[in-house]
Image: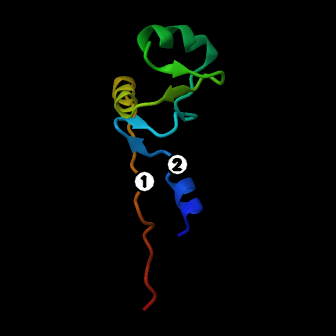
Amino acid sequence: MDAVKRSQRYSFRVHADSYHKDIHSDALAIHSSQREEHERLYPDIKIDEKNRPVFDNFKKHDKYLDDTGHVKNRAPNQPRTVRAT
């Protein structure tokens, strides 16, 4: 695997408790009417112009998921394949 494909595949690396790039979560986006309440309950989590939470730190990300009742499913490292016999 060349370096370009590898960097694209692993674009959210963790460096010293923070993400390499901020993560804008489409899955956790909120309705615009909920923005004020969200800013009151979670002042350290920024909201972008599309009402998506922005995470810059994996600890804040995990805490936010726990507080809101969401579960982060980890993707497997390798796809499972069946060998032909």
Name the residue beneath numbered marker 2: 11
Residue in front for this viewpoint, 28 or 58: 58
Disc 2 residue crowd, few under 14, some 14–19, many 20+, Cα 10 Å = few
Dividing the picture into quadrants, the one containing residue 44 is: top left
Residue drawn 38% across and 35% down? 58
Left or right of 63? Residue 43 is: right
Question: Residue at 54% of width from left, 63% of height from top?
Answer: 3
Task: Return the residue nearer the eye: 48 or 1.
Answer: 1
Look at the numbered discs 2 and 1 and tell me whether their residues touch, using CB distance below 8 Å: no
Front-most of residues 82 and 25: 25
Question: Of the residues tagged 2 and 1, which is closer to the observer?
Answer: 2
Residue 38 falls left or right of residue 4? left
Assign a secondary structure to mark 1: loop
Instruction: Tell me the amino acid under the disc marked 1.
Output: Ala
Left or right of 6 on screen, residue 50: right
Amino acid carrying label 2: it is Ser
State left or right for residue 33 relative to residue 17.
Answer: right
Mark 2 and mark 1 lie on one chain; the one further toward the N terminus is 2
Q: On the image, which quarter does residue 15 sit in? A: top left
**Residue that appears at 46% across and 20% down:** 45
Quarter of the figure with residue 14: top left
> Residue 39: where, in percent of width, then height?
49, 11
Q: For the residue labelled by badge 2, is the local secondary structure a helix, a strand or a loop?
A: loop
Q: Which mark is residue 75?
A: 1
- Residue 17 image point, x, y percent: 34, 35
Between 77 and 72, the residue placed more toward the observer is 77
